[in-house]
Every structure is written in C-alpha cells, then in structure tokens.
Image: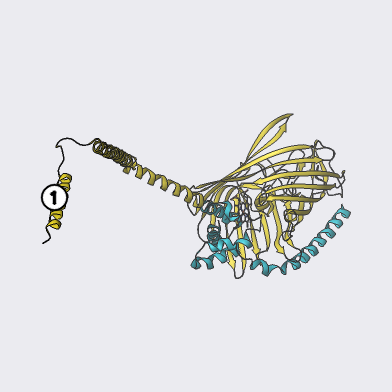
Chain colours: A yellow, B cyan
Amino acid sequence: MNTPLTCIALVGLALCSGAALGQGQPQDEGSVSRAEHEALRNDLETLRAEMAAMRKARQANERAAHQDATQAPTWIELERMRLRQDMIEQTLLEAKYGESNFHFTGFAFTRFTNVEGADSSFTAVVAPIILWELSDRLLFETELEFGLETEDGEGKTEVELEYAHASYILNDYVTLGAGKFLTPFGIFGERLHPAWINKLPDAPLPFGHHGGLVPMSSLGAYVRGGFPLGDAKGNYSFYVSNGPSLNVEGHGVGTLDFENFGDINNNKAFGGRVGFLPWPEIEVGYSFQFADVTPSGFDQQADALLQSIDVSYVTESDLLGGLIDLRFEWVFSDVDDVAFAAEVEGHAEEGGHAEEEEEGNEAFITFNNERSGGYLQLAFRPTKSDMEFLRNLEFVGRYGWLDLPSGAPDAFDQERWTIGVNYWLNPSTVLKIAYEHTEIDGGDDFDAIKAMFAIGF
Amino acid sequence: MTTKTNSHTSIRILFVVGLVWVGLLGCKTEQQIADRQPDPVAMTQIGDEASLAITGGAKLWAQNCIRCHNIRNPASLSDRQWEIVLHHMRVRANLTAQEHELILEFLKAAN
C-alpha cells in the first residue's frame, strides 16, 4: 500500500469524524446561541398566536351553537304557528265559502224631481234587507225602508216595514210562507220596484204606494212555486191576506186603501198570479184578487175584484245589437157601486154616470166604480257595442195610463209619456235621467224632469 | 171622455203590434241566448265530472237571472252568500227546484 496516501486518508478521516462529532453534541451543554434562541422564541410566538386564534374561533363556534340552541322554536311556538296557519287558511276559505246564516243586502237611492208648477226637490231613501236562512228550506226576509218626508214644514224620517215574512220550501213544487210580503199581483210590485231594478226614476201610473190601483204589499199567508211543463215553464203564487178597504169619506171616496194593516172585516182577500213561460225570454201572467172591502160601520156591502195581465220579454238581440227589455201590464179594478155621502164639492160630473141623490138633508153620490190602468215600457241597452260607454247606456220609454170612473170626486183620467236615459256603473248601480209629460183629462198638462242615482248592494 | 178612450184604444193596439214585432225580432236570437257559453275562466277551475252539470247551470243562469234585473258577477258573492241569495230568488222568482240546484252549483264554481 502507498504510505503517504494512507497517511492523508487517515488525517482526512480524523477530520471528518471530528466535524461529525462536533455537529452531534453541543459544544457547551445547557446554553444555546442567540440566533437559536431568537428562532425558538419566534416559533413559540407563532404557536401562541395560532392557539389564540384557534381558541377564538372555537369560542365563536360555541357561542353560535349556543345561540342556535336558544333560538330554535319550542313546541309551544310551533303549535302557535300551526294555529296561525290554520286561522289564515280558515279566513281564506271563509272568503270563498262564507259561514254566516245572514245576508245583508238592499238598496239606496237619491232622487231629484222637478215637476212643472211645483218646487223641485231632492229626496233620499235607504232600504236595508236582511235575509236569514235558518235551514236550506226555511228563509226569513225583511226589508225596512227609511225615507224622508216633510210634514207641517218639518222634516221627518219615515220608516216603513216593506216586508217581513218567513217561507218554507215544502217540496220541489210548493213553498209556503206568512208575514208581510210584496203582493204577487202583476209584476211591478214584486219584481221591478226596487230602485236598482226599475228602469225609470218613478213607478208607472197604476202602481205606487199611494193612489195606485193594486196592492204593493199584503199581510197574510201564501203558497207558491214553479214547475216545468215540457220545454216550457209555469209558476203560481196564491195568497190570503187582510185585504184593502174602501175609502168612503173624503177626497178619495171609491178608491181602495191598501195600506190598512189591521183587517176591517172578518173576510179575507184571496188573490194570486199564474205565470207561463213558453220560452225562457217570455212570460205572460194573469193576476186576480177578490176581497170584501166594506169598512166596519159602513152599511152597504162592497166587494172588489182586481185583475191584471202582464207580459215580460227580455232578450239579447244580435239583430239590434243589445238587450231588449219589454214590460206590459194592464190592471182592472171593479168595486161594487155604493152610495157615498157627498161631502166633496165640485167633483167631476161628466157623461151622466154620476148621480146625486137627496135623502132628507143628506146628499149621496154614486158612480160606476170601475178603474183601469197600465203601462208599456221598452228599454234597450246596446250590450253588443264595441264602446264601453255605449254598452253601459240604456234608453227607456214608457207609456202609462189611468182610466178612472167619471163622476168620482177628484178622479181624472191620466196619460203619461216618459223617456229616459240610464248609465250603468255596474250591474246594480245606475244613474237615471227622465223627462215626463202627463196629460190630465179636464186638467192642465204638465211636464217633469226626474233623476235618480240608485245602488243595489 | 170618449175621444180619450178612443185614443187609448188606438195606442194600445199599436202596442200589441209593437209587441209582436219586437217578439219576432227576438225569436231570431232565442237560440243564441240558449247557447250562451259559461265563463271560460270558471270552467278551467272545475273538474270534468262536474262540468256537464255546470254548463247546464250556466245556461239556466244566463236565461233566468236576466229576467228581472241585470246579472251580477258570480265573483261578487261567496258560496254561502250565493246559497242564501239563491234561496231568496227561488222564492221570489218561483224558480223550479232544478233551476235552483243547477244555477247554485254553477255560481259556486264560477265565483
């Protein structure tokens, strides 16, 4: 082996192992260099900061978890929410189905009248109606009418019980009822008089609460119903009621008082109407009422027979581009002729029908107590027009007449022509304006302008 | 008196002629009214099984409820209110039992 080379190798080995030993063992045990100390301190600070951040994060998590735990709804709250949901559902259902056995309805109007020779005037009426369905067969209905009147220069509120009656559907063809009801005599009183239905601001001549030829309402009992007749239809209404009484004194002698609610004798009035609809658009009706109308204390017997025919025709015509509404009624009243005390001076005595008799010191008058009256009304509404304004317009014409007995005091035949225009704001809200011309036999003709704003609610 | 009575009679004869005339005009439209279709919106809300009866009800509604006054929107009243009002109308208008039932069914579906 080469000795110098071996020596170099040994020295190298010694040096290498010395360096290695120097690295593996501290030169001075228990003390570190400054650099090492700084490095270690930095490490520690970093660790501390990381731990603090971790603790913070954990605390934040814990707090959040705790908060969640305290905010979660308890079972009471859940129950409350469920109840609230039920209530909302119930309210929604009620809005669609409704619950009540009562239904509040009716109508209101304000009317302006300017009649030639009289002061023009406004009036207002509200007529609430309450319907109470006690079962699906039993219905109670009532209408009150609140109006205004002036008596002795003082304004008053007038209240009338228009009707209050209960009805019971016995079977498909028979409904029974009793109370104060709109009289099913003709069609105006029972079907057309409410202000939002009547197409003109006033009633036709033979109708109306005062001075009309027919009863508007009656106190008694009725039986009524409708039935199919093949493709056609029929209906009937019969009633027994207290009935009217004959006016035997004062200006209205010979007329019938339909507003006497206590009966004047033990005899009741019998009446009714039968209707026939060959097609759904057309109805013809015949009405009658028979009554003993002798007032108590009057010494002569007087019976009254009232009869009427009516025709209704309502259809939407393509040819005319709108809705036609035609009504016709003709009423006849025949009251037994009796002798009335002649208190009234200056009564009409034409045609030789009236007779005046002297019996001792008392004077009597008698006349053929037959009356008739009627009306024909035609309305047209261009429901097929493209313009909304036109669709809401309605044009109405009516001719009415009253034939009264010649010889009866203060009884003058009348004819009345009315034309009117209506504007419908919705199916039951209407503004009506009408012009009227009335001719009085033996008196002065007069004109009138009438306007009405009516709402059915 | 006599002249008045004469003028009354001629006017009334005119009315009867007028009545017949308007009647003839209207007869042409009879079928159209009978065929009037119910509100399509209402029809989409009901099942097939009920729709037949309701189409019948809609027709009866269009034919009957216009006879005395304007027709009100079915949506203007709730089911319960229609029940009471239809009860009222059945008595007032002498509706047949079937008309009552079918029209009510239609109104409840269409409101």
Looking at the image, how many numbered discs can be counted on the residues?
A: 1
- Residue A5 at what x, y percent from top left? 15, 57
* Pick the front one: A203 or A342: A203
**Residue corresponding to mark 1:** A14
Q: Determine the secondary structure under disc 1.
A: helix
Quarter that holds the N terminus of chain A: bottom left
Q: Chain of mark 1?
A: A
Note whether A51 is above or below B76 in the view shown: above
Q: Position of residue A281 (x, y in %)?
A: 67, 63
Pick whichever, A128 or A154, lies toward us. A128
Whether residue A197 is visible to the viewer of this picture, yes or no, is: no
Please tell me in which quadrant of the rendered image residue B40 appears: bottom right
Residue type highlighted by circle 1: Ala
Residue A126 appears left or right of A449:
left
Side (left or right) of A283 relative to A416: left
Q: Position of residue A132 (x, y in %)?
A: 52, 47
**Mark 1: few/some/many CA within 10 Å (<14, 14-19, 20+):** few
Camera-nearest residue between A355 and A90: A90
Up-down: is B28 above or below A168? below
Q: Nearer the viewer, residue A383 or A285?
A: A383
